Image (tube, rainbow, N blue to C red):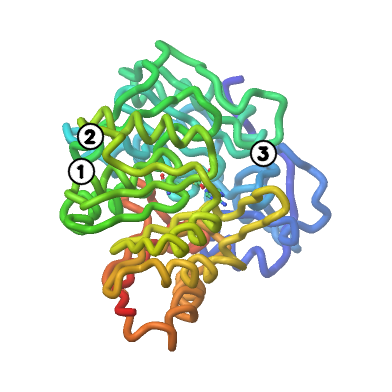
Amino acid sequence: MSKQKAIYQQKVTNQAKKRILNGNPLIQPADCIDLKLMNQWVDFVDEKNNWLAQGYLGKQNKGVGWILSLTKCEFDQAFFTQKFQKAKQKRSAFFSQDLTTAFRLVNGEGDGLGGITIDYYQGYAVISWYNETIYQVKELILKAFLTVYPDTLGIYEKNRFETTLPETQHIYGKAAPEPLIIKENGIQYATYLNEGWMTGIFLDQKEVRNYLASGFASGKKVLNMFSYTGAFSIASAMGGALSTTSVDLAKRSLPKTKEQFSINGIDPASQKIHVIDTFDYFHYAQKKGLTFDLIILDPPSFARNGKKVFSVAKNYGQLIADSLPILSKKGWIVASTNAANVSVKRFKQMIEQELKGKVQSYQLVQTFQLPIDFTVLPTFEQGNYLKVFIYQIVR
Ligand code: SAH
C-alpha cells in the first residue's frame, strides 16, 4: 500500500465540530452521527456535510478515532515522514546527551499522530499501536520512520489493542540485548524490549527520578509503593538515601529490582524489597512501628487483587490516609498518577482532603508533569495525563 486515502465520510455533531476546530483531536462515540464505519480512514464532516477534518476511526481504550489533519491531505509516506521529522526537530537536544540514552520520539496526538507512540532505547525503537486502523498502515509508517531514522538498529512493536497478535514482537533489524542497559542522567536501568507491553522503565517519570537522585532523597528513609522494577528506589539510593524499601505485588518485581541495584553497583541485599500488596504492607509497617521520611505512591490507574479493586479516581485518598501513620514526624509524600480521567485539580483535592485537619501542616513543595519529549497539545488536557505532587508534611 503506498498511501491511505480518506474516502469515507463521518458526520459529527455540532458540539464535536466546535471541539475539533478548537484543536481537540480525539473522537468519541457520542461525537459521531450514525457511527458505523470502524477501522476506516475518513473525512469528518459537519451536520450540513461541510468538510471539517481528516483522520481515522479505530476503536481503542480511549475514544474511537483521531483527527490527523485540519487541512486536506493524503495519508501517504510523505505525510508520516514529515510528522516524524518535525517530532525529531523538537527533540534535537536529546540526541546529543551521553548521560540519557532513552526517551520518547513520537508522542501520539502531541506530535499530530494520535494512536501511536515511539520510544528510543539506545539505538532501538519501540512502537506502540493503540488501535487496528493505524496498525493497518504499519508498512507505510515503518518506511517513513526509517527514512527519518536510518540508523535504527532494531524495532519492536507493542500491540495495545484488541487483537490476536502478540503483545510484543521484534519487527525489524537486530534483536536488542536482554537486558538492554540504558542510561538516564547517568543512572543505569535494565530494559527488556520484548517482554509484554512494558519495558522495565516508564520514561515519562525521568524528571522525578532525577529529582530523587540529585539531592531530594539524600539522607532519607524511602518507601517506594507500587515499585514495579524499583526505578524510584534505584534513583533514591543513587542519590544517597539512607535506606530504600520497595513494595510490589508482582513476583517479577523482586529479581528485576535486584538487577537494577546490581547494575549500578549497589548490593541488593543492602536494600529492602517486598513482594506484597501495598495495603497489607501498610498494616505490617504500622504494626512493626516502622517509619519513613519519604513515601512514594505511584499506583496503576486501575488494579485488581483478588476481589479487591483499586482505582485512582476513587481510592487514591486511601493511600494518603494509610501513609500518615508510618510517615516521620516531618516527612514527604510523592503523590503520583497517570490517570487521564483525574484532573490536576481533582488529584490535589483528593490528597489534601486526607491531610486537612489530620496533620499539623502540609505544603506542596514540588510539581512535575510530562517531560518535554512527551509533547502535549495545549488544546487536549486529557493528553497531559501525568501528575506528580510532592508534599512536605508535619504530623
Ligand atoms: N512506580 C513504578 C510504576 C508502577 S506500575 C515506576 O515508576 O516504575 C504499577 C505497579 O503496581 C505494577 O508493578 C503492579 O504489579 C503494582 N501493583 C498493582 N496493584 C498493587 C497492589 N495492590 N499492591 C502492590 N503493588 C501493586
Point 38% across, 50% down: residue: 375
- Residue type beneath disc 2: Ile
Residues tagged 1 and 2 counted as in contact (Cβ below 8 A): yes
Q: Residue furthest front?
A: 288
Point 64% across, 27% down: residue: 136
Q: Quadrant of residue 293?
A: bottom left
**Res 359 visible:** yes
- Residue type beneath disc 3: Trp
Q: Position of residue 360 (x, y in %)?
A: 33, 86
Classify residue 215 as left or right of residue 109. Answer: left
Label ID, residue 41: 3
Which residue corresponds to mark 2? 266
Q: What quarter of the picture does the C terminus occupy?
A: bottom left
Look at the picture and state if 63 lies above or below 203: below
Point 30% across, 69% down: residue: 328
Q: Residue furthest bottom?
A: 357
Q: Position of residue 194 (x, y in %)?
A: 49, 22
Q: What quarter of the picture does the N terminus occupy?
A: top right
Distance Cα–Cα, label 1 vs label 2: 8 Å
Q: Quadrant of residue 266?
A: top left
Q: Mark 1: give few (<14), some (14-19) or many (20+) Cα within 10 Å.
A: many
**Res 101 visible:** no
Label 2: state its secondary structure: loop
Which residue corresponds to mark 1? 238
Classify residue 98 as left or right of residue 327. Answer: left
